[in-house]
Image (cartoon, helix red, strand yellow):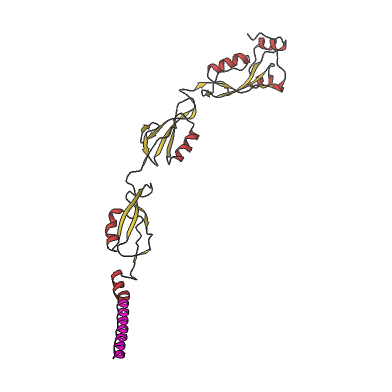
Amino acid sequence: MKRKNLKDLSLHVVLGILLAAILVSTFIFVILPNYTKHGETITVPDLIGQNIEDLEEEVIKRKLRYEVNDSVFSQTDPPLTILRQYPKPGSKVKEGRKILISVNRVLPPTIPLPAVVDRPLSELKIVLQNNDLKINMIKAENYPHYNLVLRVELNGKTINPGQPIPKGSALDIVVGDGAGKHLNNMPDVVFIEYKTAVSILKAFDLNIEPLNIKDKKDTSGLVLYVNKQYPNPDSLVKIGEWVKLWVDSEIDSTFYKSLHIKPDTAVIERLESNSPVDNE
């Protein structure tokens, strides 16, 4: 009797184990795959370059979702264009997976115009480049200082330093042409004492280059005269332009003959006598 009970118990245990194995196997290989759709994936479409307004149908028909993760700005792409996405195109995902996208902004971000007025044009180019700004055109205007930035314009309007402007803007730059309000006729200082010539040139706001004294001889105690000048007399010169003078205590007869001009007799006599003249 006891053996029979033990045998029945063993049979029940074995049957219980078999039943448990069948249930586990059914859950793992039948129920679970159907519940999780194991082995079934969706290929992520390429959304880059599409407009977000056309995205809804593209994503829903693939049983996916999307979410705008952030917005950036690109001048080369239309507004609301998708610039980035995650997961990347071609990735395998489950149904209902959310795709994170970055969208091009409708309006560009603004930045304050850097302090570029009253600075050289060469410096302005570097400053604009570092601030993601561009130069549309450079316009010259009468002003004594050459290539000094006078003002910055955008769409025909003057922009002051610190004023917000769209990032990536192409600006019009107005610079000085170095001519001032007008050009002057170069004064004639040939045959004139050097000291007097300097006074005349300074009155015209002109600069004088170092003297070119013939043979670098000692001219101490002698009166110096201008034998030649450049630019030539009556040519147009700008304010601040440099003038080159050839100066000597003797008359350059070759130069005078080339001009068919006879120098003043009193000047010749004074130079030939080597008599110093009071510069005062």
Single out the residue that lies furthest toward the front: 2
Viewed as shown, does residue 45 lie left or right of 267?
left
Q: Position of residue 2 (x, y in %)?
A: 30, 89
Magenta segment includes 253:
no
User: Number of numbered discs present?
Assistant: 0
Dividing the picture into quadrants, the one containing residue 172 is: top left
Which part of the image, by quadrant, shows the N terminus?
bottom left
Please state which of residues 203 and 67 is positioned toward the viewer in this rendering.
67
Magenta segment includes 4:
yes
Dividing the picture into quadrants, the one containing residue 162 is: top left
Q: Residue at the spot x=53%, y=16% of the render?
A: 203
Q: Residue at the spot x=29%, y=88% of the render?
A: 5
Viewed as shown, does residue 18 lie left or right of 178?
left
Q: Residue at the spot x=32%, y=81% of the render?
A: 17
Please state which of residues 20 and 271 is positioned toward the viewer in this rendering.
20
Q: Position of residue 185 (x, y in %)?
A: 52, 20
- Is 62 above or below relative to 260? below
- Is 37 above or below relative to 253? below
- Is 191 above or below relative to 17? above
Which part of the image, by quadrant, shows the C terminus?
top right
Main SS, magenta residues: helix
Q: Position of residue 147 (x, y in %)?
A: 49, 31
- Is 208 above or below relative to 57? above
Q: Position of residue 236 (x, y in %)?
A: 52, 24
Please state which of residues 122 and 226 is positioned toward the viewer in this rendering.
122
Instruction: Point out the stretch of residues depicted in magenta.
Output: 1-25
